Amino acid sequence: MKRLLYIFMMLTALSCTVAESEVSVIPQPQSLKVSSGSLDVSGASFWIDEGVPAQAVSAIGLFMDEVPDSGMSQSRAKSLFRFVSNPDLAEDAYEISVNRRRVRISASSFNGFLYAIQTLRQVLNEDMTVRCMKVKDAPRFGYRGMHLDSARHFWSVDQVKKYLDIMALHKMNRFHWHLTDDQGWRVEIKKYPLLTEVGSKRKGTVLGKGWYVIEYDNIPYEGFYTQEQIREIVSYAASKGIEIIPEIDLPGHMLAALASYPSLGCTGRGYEVWGRWGVSADVLCVGKEETFEFIENVLLEIMDLFPGKYIHIGGDECPKARWKECPACKARMKELGLEGEDAAVQLQAYVTDRVETFLAAHGRSIIGWDEILAGDISKSATIMSWRGTDGGIAASRAGHDVIMTPNSYCYLDYYQSRRIQDEPFAIGGFVDVRKVYSFEPFTSEMTPEQKSHILGVQANLWTEYIKTPEHLEYMLLPRMSALSEVQWCSPENRDYDRFLDKMTRMVDLYRKMGFNFARHIFEVSPVIGVDESLGCPQVTLTTQGDAPMYYTLDGSEPSVCSIPYTGPVSVGDSDVFKAIVDRDDIETKVYCQHFTRHKAVGKPITMNTKPAPYYSAGLPQSLVNGVLNEDEDAAAGEWMAWRGEPVDVVIDMGGESYSKVSVRTFVSKWEDMYAPLGLSAYVSDDNESFVEIASEEYEIEQERVPDGVKTYDLDFPDTSARYLKVVVRTVPALPSWSERLGKPAYLFLDEIKVE
Ligand code: ACM
Ligand code: ZN
């Protein structure tokens, strides 16, 4: 009997895990318990209790339209879907209970019911059945945001609404809308009609990337939202439980306003709406009272349009050069008693505080980018930490509320694949789905008090290089799905493999709702190491779910008849590896990797200095795995970067003879990526005492020398010393013509060739 009971218990436990994995909800609910049986809901009758908020009643009505032949019930007892108000549940929390006869949904707020409906949408099967289950759910963070830049490229009312639909699917509740910038003013302000007549138009848009040398498309570009359209979007967002936080970026990023009203600038003339990207030196003149009058009048209309608590006042990337020369700004600094190096920084803090006081008098609170922490500002400002998390951590220590949006995890304009030759052109960087998913806004050093200041997490979508809705959605999905679990779930309730499994169901919803999405997680995901015993590159593949993968080593196109992938593949002498995933429902690309051969490929390598954490994509072996990057972008392939110290590596050549070392580097001076200042090779037989066998020094590359991939060689008499040390000297301080004079430069490397 005991034995039988044991078997029964095992079976129940098993059926439970199987059943739970059949029910797929993103973001993962706090508690989801699936039991046996299911309920057919086609033709269901709906009952809504009196206590349910009126806004929720309309949302329930929309959901009812998705259930075929459904309708309102005259009797609570006979209804199948029962929506019940439960004031004991927290704001945003909800519960769903499904048994073989009915579905009971309870919440205390409009948003709680909305989130319950989103969960129902995800658990409703194609055949209109729902598994029996109990869901108890509530979010980890109250602020779950997404940002959209409508200034660099303009998004129509319908496109913005679709963006809000994608947010709603993921139970997000704050839309940060970047409405003004150097490249366009996009919101109608009745008191200042030129802001849109002049400021919403640019003569053309820059082609490609660059700072010192640029080219334009010369195609006029324009667009703005009328106040009526803004109100329509605000109301649409509210119906989805989303509050809009408008951003009027000041006192920098204001060129479109200066082009419209030149007297707002320090020099007062010569302004044009920018067609290029970057940070403009021309900013608002904050010495003049006229400027504050302008800011306040604009914000009065903004507050009238956007009823939410927060107004974002930007504050990022505000160069101080003009203020330091401007008589009005200098007089203002003097009047405020601001002196020395820090004076202009404190002048920005004066602006921040003045605007904060004005908005507070109207019952609103400010959010600003983490740059505003540089000055002494009021604790009531909420800080948006974008340059990593350090600003957010410091702000929470100082008592500010914080929204974490670090570029290294949350910038969805960055590349999401290292194979950028297959990607639409992007600003750079690298943030894949896994990276987004791995973000944890709390650190182990934070006190409970600090943690209480972290309001939540947001991802940003800057649109310099994004022009079409398809591209926009491609950048959002599935990274937004990953973000939603960071925002909603506690760390214990996050599991990347489970998340990937759930994506099978999620892409059905994307398709149903007409959203474009990126397919990388469904393709092969490669890591290229080396097989030291065979002295050759070795490829390890993974992919979402259990789809089979196949590969070839002879250059032929892989198919289901090729070699099935079962584990790491040593490529031997082959110079190309190709692989596919076999999926019925999702089209994926063929993966193709070429290899170059030289004497260090597959040799053991040790790094005496480490690459910068953000640019250490590959393994140490990446420098000797025969992979040369095909793209000229720091985000691509396996570039590694050293900064502030030389590259210093030792390769165990194992007794082979050699007479040449080449290092392959990528130079992009406007991004602080410089060519080396020197290259030296040393040899040793004991890995302790090394002797120099060749060395070269190079001049620092000048501004106008073309950037790109460059190779530096050292030739020396044939040697078969076992250990080869290669040292590449980096630029310790950026030259005078650089924006960031004095900071150390990066040195990028992808391979150290030995011949
Ligand atoms: C920013 O990305 N400049 C906030
Ligand atoms: Zn000025």
Image (cartoon, rainbow, N blue to C red):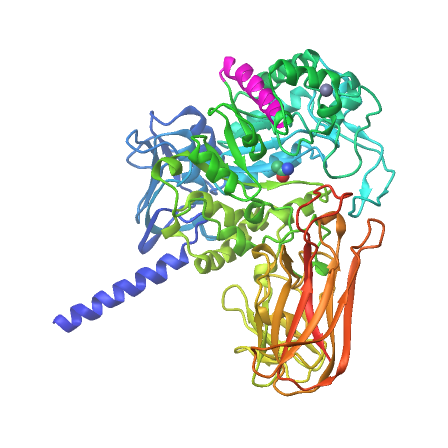
Say whether residue 345 is visible.
yes
Q: Is residue 199 above or below residue 403?
A: above
In-front residue for pair 370/36: 370
For the C terminus, give its image quadrant: bottom right
Magenta segment: 345-363
Q: Residue 223 sits in which quadrant?
A: top right
Could you say where residue 387 lies in the image, as x and y percent from the top left?
58, 42
Left-right relation of 668 to 502: right
Dominant secondary-structure state across the stretch colored magenta: helix
Q: Quadrant of ligand 2?
A: top right
Q: How many marks?
A: 0
Could you say where residue 346 lies in the image, as x and y percent from the top left?
59, 25
Could you say where residue 611 lies in the image, as x and y percent from the top left?
59, 60
In-front residue for pair 704/164: 704
Left-right relation of 141 to 657: left
Q: Is residue 553 above or below residue 340?
A: below
